[in-house]
Image (spheres, rainbow, N blue to C red):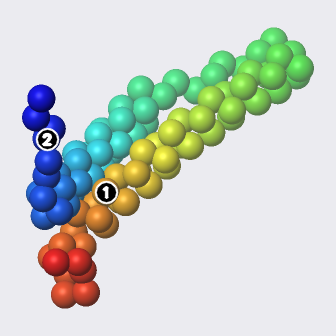
Amino acid sequence: MHSLRLSPEGLRTLSALAGIVLVLVVFAIALQFFYNYQRPHPGADVVSSITSLASEAVYLLGKVAFLGVALLAATQLLKYGLKRGSPGGEA
């Protein structure tokens, strides 16, 4: 069985491409969330309105956290991939 081995330069190129793809995917998901967002309807009373708004806030916070983690991963891949072209980067 042969194992797949990438040179450090090939790995950095692959990381840069994966980072670019992830940034574009995160941007597309954020646009989709933005254009498909529907505001919650007010409840019949104050308690149901507060409950609805609190659950919507948690839902939106989850979306923001997901997009933030995905964007952080993408920037780390890009940083590693672009390091090869910088003068101070590894050869």
Residue located beneath label 1 in the image: 77
Position of residue 76 measured from the top left corner of the image (x, y, whole percent): 37, 60
| Side of 69 relative to 89 (left or right) | right
Position of residue 91 measured from the top left corner of the image (x, y, whole percent): 16, 78
Name the foreground residue: 62 vs 88.
88
Crowd band around label 1 with a 10 angstrom C-alpha radius: few (<14), some (14–19), many (20+): many
* Residue 75 lies in quadrant: bottom left
Above or below residue 19? Residue 54 is above
Q: Which mark is residue 57?
A: none
**Which residue lies most toward the bottom here?**
87
Above or below residue 1? Residue 79 is below
Position of residue 59 measured from the top left corner of the image (x, y, whole percent): 62, 29
Residue drawn at 29 percent across, 45 percent down: 22
Name the foreground residue: 9 vs 40.
9
Position of residue 60 measured from the top left corner of the image (x, y, whole percent): 60, 35
Residue 13 shows in the view = no
Name the foreground residue: 34 vs 67.
67
Q: Secondary structure at mark 1?
A: helix
Amino acid at circle 1: Leu
Q: Secondary structure at mark 2?
A: loop
Residue drawn at 54 percent across, 43 percent down: 64
| Side of 62 relative to 67 (left or right) | right
Q: Which mark lies nearer to you, 2 or 1?
A: 2
Residue located beneath label 2 in the image: 4
